[in-house]
Amino acid sequence: MTTRNQSSVTEFFLLGFSNLPELQFLLFVSFFIIYLMILTGNLLIILITTVDRTLQSPMYFFLRCLSFLEICFDSVTVPKILAVLSTEDKSISFAGCFVQMLFFITFGVGECCLLAAMAYDRYLAICNPLCYPVLMNRQVLIQLTGGSWLLGLLVAIVQTTWIFSFPFCGPNDINYFFCDTPPVLELVCADTSVIELCTLMGTILVNVVPFLLILLSYIYIISTILKMPSTEGRKKAFSTCSSHLIVVALFYGAAILTYLQPKASSSAESKKLLTLSYILLTPVLNPLIYSLRNSEVKRTLRRTLCWKTCS
């Protein structure tokens, strides 16, 4: 940030959906409802898995962390999107853009790593059940979740600080709805080939490597499940894993399409739509997926709703 004084740009303007003026109100209402659903659904998951004594296993600890991460992830971007849609002020300060990108990368990378940690948890629970309580103790849980957050923060600090050390001479219009790496780099008035290559390599590492680890874990998991003699045991094992697999497919599918797609093959508008699925679709579906496909969560939810209704 020391080179900020050399830059003529002190603020940016988020163009967002300014090319669709007639849809501003509809977009605002839609995003506001989705954001409320994200907050309500994920807070409900956190509440249920915290207060119910039967949901205190490592799997639900990771689920609480994932829901909390989803809330943080969307709270970095959605409120600013709503503010831009509801007012004429589309500006974001230089420092505000820096902070938004910093936290967006932190939570994004953290979620990639946390989903891999959840896959490792399921691998130990199904493939090595006798040693599971020892291998997945509280210390390991804290190390895995804390490591996910720490790695995300380190990647974010390095990448964001590097990007904002470049000079911004104008224009200062970001053809996006928040400060993400690719659209901000387009405004740099210097050679960005090195940082673009490093950013691509970093994206591959934090997206593809955890994804491959998840696939490897599930190869072993599915192989173990198929060898189970009990049909009921196989059904229960598949049930506990299917929710996580669906979430992984949604999150990584959208992330890979958004950040690893060649520039020439996608327009700015199509990339915006992909990013919306990345920051809105997955967080709003996660609570539904885990609550509808998990019998223990459904049972606890029914019991909680019944208790509130009856009281």
Image (cartoon, grey):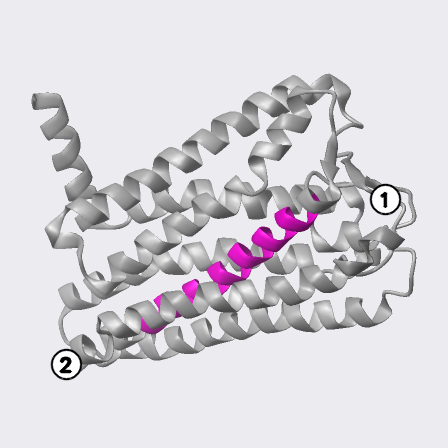
- Residue shown at the point (61%, 62%) measured from the top left: 156
**Which callout, 1 or 2, points to the residue nearer the camera?**
1
Q: Image quadrant for the C terminus?
A: top left
Q: Position of residue 53 (x, y in %)?
A: 11, 51
Disc ID at residue 130: 2
Say which quarter of the image contains residue 220: bottom left
- Residue shown at the point (51%, 40%) measured from the top left: 75
Label 2 packing within 10 angstroms: few (<14), some (14-19), many (20+): few
Q: Amino acid at mark 1?
A: Val
* Main SS class of the magenta portion in the image: helix
Q: Position of residue 163 (x, y in %)?
A: 76, 60
Cβ atoms under marks 1 and 2 closer than 8 Å: no
Disc ID at residue 9: 1
* Label located before the other in sequence (1 or 2): 1
Q: Amino acid at mark 2?
A: Leu
Q: Is residue 260 visible?
A: no
